[in-house]
């Protein structure tokens, strides 16, 4: 973690250091929005900044610990927990991906580190897309990993998101609320046991606000950027997990084709490939370097 400076995120932080695979995170208060935990890993002097946005039911530590060492050789690396996830902002209002995007923008503005490369995995992909759309002055480019610009496409997708709708309806009945929380915890624990981090994942997800996580899943099902993603200005890259069982690879590639200036970086793995530094981590570094390099050239031409 960097030492506090006038532009440091640690100005206005409260609470204890929170150690983890990304190093030490600190709570950061975003005025008018709430408090989240942010990790700040120093890169080379003068390096551009990448902001890492994690996936649904995950945390920054779970999602990005395999990638951060490679990224920090070239970039300043910033990562945060999203609303309702891990140490993310707790809000009494309705969860929205747009609010998560605005949280990211508030952080980038408060630190004065923009424009940044936004890097989103799975649910973090739509959040990155929305940061890019809603705050284009803060975004140098985007890297979209194991994600898509629309999620509820097939009959299987609609059934899955229909289950989330049913759980949300049940959660509004007071007598059923605790049962819904047990179901959500059980589903996430079963998912964690099939993936690389195992026990660490269970420890991380124990911090979730499960009803916010439920609403996050429903919001993901409503996301559809197909009509506007191609109009966003700036370089991008798509990291395609070719054996992905959650976001089909053909959907990831279709998103890449809709982008106007995207490189494609393929990883031979499924949705849990993000835990492998030798494949996913290398691809993310290559994608970020490609985007940052093209952004620098565009800036030099414009100047």
Image (cartoon, rainbow, N blue to C red):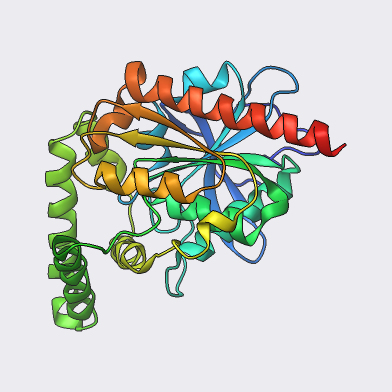
Residue 205 image position (x, y, % from top left) = 28, 46
Q: Is residue 224 shown left or right of residue 130?
A: left
- Quarter residue 94 falls in: bottom left
Q: Is residue 113 shown left or right of residue 243?
A: right
Foreground of the two, 126 or 32: 126
- Quarter residue 8 falls in: top right
The residue at the point 25 percent across, 25 percent down is 268
Which quadrant is the C terminus positioned in? top right
Q: Is residue 4 visible?
A: no
**33 above or below 104?**
below
Residue 114 image position (x, y, % from top left) = 72, 42
Which quadrant is the N terminus positioned in? top right
Residue 191 image position (x, y, % from top left) = 16, 44
Foreground of the two, 180 or 100: 100
Foreground of the two, 218 or 201: 218
The residue at the point 60 percent across, 53 percent down is 132
Q: Is residue 75 visible?
A: yes
Q: Is residue 240 shown left or right of residue 60?
A: left
**21 above or below 248?**
above
- Direction bottom: furthest residue: 173
Residue 224 image position (x, y, % from top left) = 40, 65
The residue at the point 83 percent across, 39 percent down is 302
């Amino acid at each position: 973690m960097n030492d506090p400076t006038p532009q440091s995120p640690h100005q206005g932080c409260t609470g204890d250091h929170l150690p983890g695979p990304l190093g030490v995170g600190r709570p950061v208060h975003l005025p008018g929005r709430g408090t989240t935990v942010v990790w700040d890993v120093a890169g080379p002097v003068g390096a551009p900044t990448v902001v890492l946005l994690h996936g649904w039911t995950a945390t920054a530590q779970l999602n990005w610990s395999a990638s951060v060492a490679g990224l920090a050789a070239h970039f300043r690396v910033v990562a945060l927990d999203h609303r309702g996830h891990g140490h993310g902002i707790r809000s009494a209002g309705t969860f929205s991906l747009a609010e998560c995007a605005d949280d990211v923008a508030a952080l980038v503005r408060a630190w004065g580190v923009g424009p940044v490369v936004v890097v989103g995995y799975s649910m973090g992909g739509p959040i990155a897309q929305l940061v890019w759309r809603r705050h284009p002055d803060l975004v140098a480019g985007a890297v979209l990993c194991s994600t898509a610009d629309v999620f509820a496409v097939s009959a299987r997708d609609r059934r899955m998101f229909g289950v989330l709708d049913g759980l949300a309806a049940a959660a509004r009945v007071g007598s059923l609320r605790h049962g819904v929380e047990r179901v959500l915890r059980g589903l996430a624990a079963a998912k964690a046991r099939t993936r690389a981090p195992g026990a660490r994942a269970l420890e991380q997800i124990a911090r979730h606000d499960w009803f916010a996580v439920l609403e996050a899943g429903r919001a993901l099902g409503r996301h559809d950027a197909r009509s506007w993603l191609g109009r966003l200005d700036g370089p991008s890259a798509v990291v395609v997990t070719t054996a992905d069982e959650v976001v089909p690879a053909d959907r990831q590639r279709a998103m890449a084709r809709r982008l106007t200036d995207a490189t494609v970086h393929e990883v031979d793995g499924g949705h849990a490939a993000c835990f492998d530094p030798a494949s996913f981590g290398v691809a993310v570094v290559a994608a970020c370097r490609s985007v940052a390099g093209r952004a620098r050239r565009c800036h030099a031409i414009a100047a």
